[in-house]
Amino acid sequence: MLNLKDKRVLILAPHTDDAEFGCGATISKLIEQGSEVYSVAFSACQQSVLKQFPSDILITEVKEASVELGIKKENLILLDYAVRTFNYKRQEILEDLLKLRSDIEPSVIFMPTMHDLHQDHLTIAQEGLRAFKFCTIFSYELPWNNLQFASSSFSVVTETHLKKKINAITKYKSQAHRNYANEEFIRSLARVRGTQINESYAECFELIRLKF
Ligand SMILES: [Zn+2]
């Protein structure tokens, strides 16, 4: 069993809700176990928020969701890239990542997969690997954006961790219309992933690099 206790963990979230969907239960577990978890979101998608909500609502929501998962206020980093423009800003994003690397000195990274179909997610995965190639790297799954996903590593989670993930996602009222933003889907995926390793619940990750 790989133990990430006492490790400094950095989650790369292209958009404010990606960390919760991709690894919310694992974030909750790692914090409970004593890891120092940081999360950086590169965009609050102000350009694509539905009209009935204030354009900065995702900033409010990510703060609430992070509290639910146990992420310290000072460990949540919010950057201000415009949604769907990350590939035009590749070098700036890489420089931000290099600064985070020297400021935080993480040893474990969670990020989207190298096969993610969303252009912003792919940019973060590519630049994330470039910046953190000497760290352990796991890619989290977002099935609606993944054409393929290797089930190469699993984080066993409890009902409590899963409930924290569901509660965190529930904070995103502006995203509640998405067909994957509901308890039934989140529980089902955790059950499928748990069943693959003979546990009740799990989150699945593609292992990109392992340093131990
Ligand atoms: Zn996203």
Image (cartoon, helix red, strand yellow):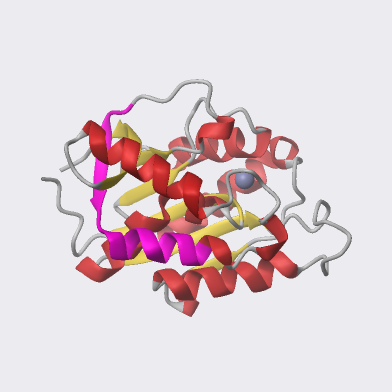
Regarding residue 117, the answer to whether it shows in the image is yes
Q: Position of residue 156 (x, y in %)?
A: 23, 48
Residue sitting farthest toward the right: 51
Nearer to me, 199 or 20: 199
Q: What residue sits 49% from the left and 54% below the top?
A: 183
Regarding residue 104, the answer to whether it shows in the image is no
Q: Is residue 179 left or right of residue 131?
A: right
Q: Position of residue 135 (x, y in %)?
A: 31, 44
Compared with residue 129, is residue 102 higher up or lower down, i.e. above or below?
below
Q: Position of residue 46 (x, y in %)?
A: 79, 59
Q: Is residue 34 left or right of residue 191?
A: left
Q: Position of residue 35 (x, y in %)?
A: 26, 65
Looking at the rendering, which quadrant does residue 153 occupy?
top left
Looking at the rendering, which quadrant does residue 41 occupy?
bottom right
Quarter of the figure that contains the N terminus: top left
Q: Is residue 182 left or right of residue 158?
A: right
Is residue 153 on the magenta stretch?
yes
The stretch of residues the image draws in magenta is 151-168
Q: Ligand 1 lies in which image quarter? A: top right
